[in-house]
Amino acid sequence: MMGKLIVELPEHLHLELKKKATLEQRTLKSVITELVKNYISEEQSPEVVSETGLCGAWQDQREPEEIIRDIKSHRKWSLPRRKT
């Protein structure tokens, strides 16, 4: 069984992808399948993640529930909308 994936791309990317596939005498399906396989098989080494300097950088004494409440209270999109 095969799964289906529908992706909307910006027109310029879609055209470039079609052009490249045509030049290589390949189908869009085969090109995209290869791209996805390569993406999934990429191994992320721990060094790459830790080099960002962000791992473990956030230290907070509050309980997780308190942090979540604080974050949610500052979200403007979660507030009820006013009728105009």
Image (cartoon, grey):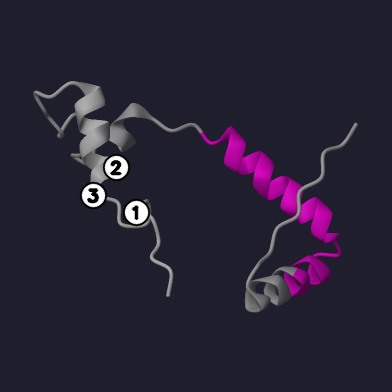
Secondary structure of the residue carrying numbered label 3: loop
User: Which residue lies under the disc numbered 3?
Assistant: 74
User: Which residue lies under the disc numbered 1?
Assistant: 79
Residue range of the region highlighted in magenta in the rendering: 18-42
Residue 19 in the image: state x and y as whole percent.
76, 74
User: Which residue lies under the disc numbered 2?
Assistant: 72
Secondary structure of the residue carrying numbered label 2: helix
Q: Main structural element of the magenta stretch: helix, strand or loop?
A: helix
Residue 66 in the image: state x and y as whole percent.
20, 28
Residue type at numbered disc 3: His
Residue 61 figure quarter: top left
Please tell me which of labels 1 and 2 falls first in the chain.
2
In the image, is residue 44 part of the stretch drawn in magenta? no
Residue type at numbered disc 2: Lys
Q: Do the residues labelled 3 and 2 touch (CB within 8 Å)?
A: yes
Q: Is residue 46 left or right of residue 74?
A: right
Residue most toward the left?
61
